[in-house]
Amino acid sequence: MIEYIWKTHEIRFSIPGLNKWLHQQNFSYKYPKGLPHKFDEEKQAVFIEEHTKLKSQAVDEPILFMNAMHPTQATKVSCGWIKTGYDKALETTGSRTRLNLVGAIDLNNLAAAQVKCYDKVNGDTFQHFFEEIREYNGSDQRIHLILDGAGYHRAEGVKKKAKELNIELHYLPPYSPNLNPIERLWKICQSDS
């Protein structure tokens, strides 16, 4: 960056000087937020409009956002400052333990997040999780469940179980994890692991 500024503006900064100037200009050192490269802006806008309508119509019916997460218990190596020409060895664990979590949250009651751990994630897993959701939310009211379009979410057995339990499935547009609030919960879980 120092070279770029010198070449384009003929202003010379030291590294500490540039850091100080960037902070004064309200810049901070952070990772950019990635957007899925295949998302369809129009489909996302339609989903947002439909979700807004759903919230106004389903006043007494829970609206849940659901997804699965698969954290691993492997050592996560991150970046750091290492002197040029040297390598820094970091002992890692040989363990590759993986959890399979399925969760659902209601934005009107975040404290009541439902999360279950399973041996594997497939259509049967979600059918079982639907039963858990139904038990938690009572037996009479319709439940709206927003989820992504993963193959096991669209399996016939999953759709049949949802209908049987009076759970209405609403699918997110493809490549739209940014529209599923439970992704933020998973991100926090991943960052703390």
Image: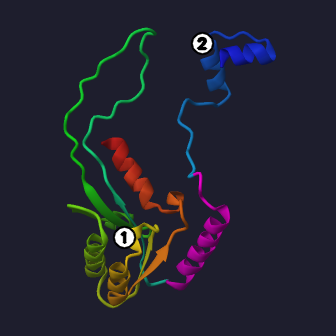
- The label on residue 130 is none
Amino acid on which disc 1 is placed: Tyr
Foreground of the two, 123 or 181: 123
* Residue 55 falls inside the magenta stretch: yes
Tell which circle, 1 or 2, labels the residue nearer the N-terminal end.
Answer: 2
- Total labels: the figure holds 2
Q: Nearer the viewer, mark 1 or mark 2?
A: 1
Q: Position of residue 57 (x, y in %)?
A: 54, 85
Label 2 residue SS: helix
Q: Give the image location of residue 162, x and y in percent.
A: 36, 83
Q: Does residue 5 show up magenta in the picture?
A: no
The secondary structure that most of the magenta stretch takes on is: helix
In the rendered structure, the answer to whether residue 64 lies left or right of residue 25 reads left
Q: Residue 20 or 53: which is nearer the viewer?
A: 53
| x 36%, y 67%: residue | 104
- The range drawn in magenta is 37-58
Residue 152 badge: 1
- Name the image quarter holding the C terminus: top left
Left or right placement of residue 160 versus residue 47 in this view: left
Q: Which residue is mark 2?
A: 15
Are the residues tagged 1 and 2 within 8 Å (C-beta)? no
* Inter-mark Cα distance, 1 to 2: 51 Å
Q: Amino acid at mark 2?
A: Ile
In this picture, is 9 found above or below 137? above
Which residue is at 62% across, 25% downward?
A: 23
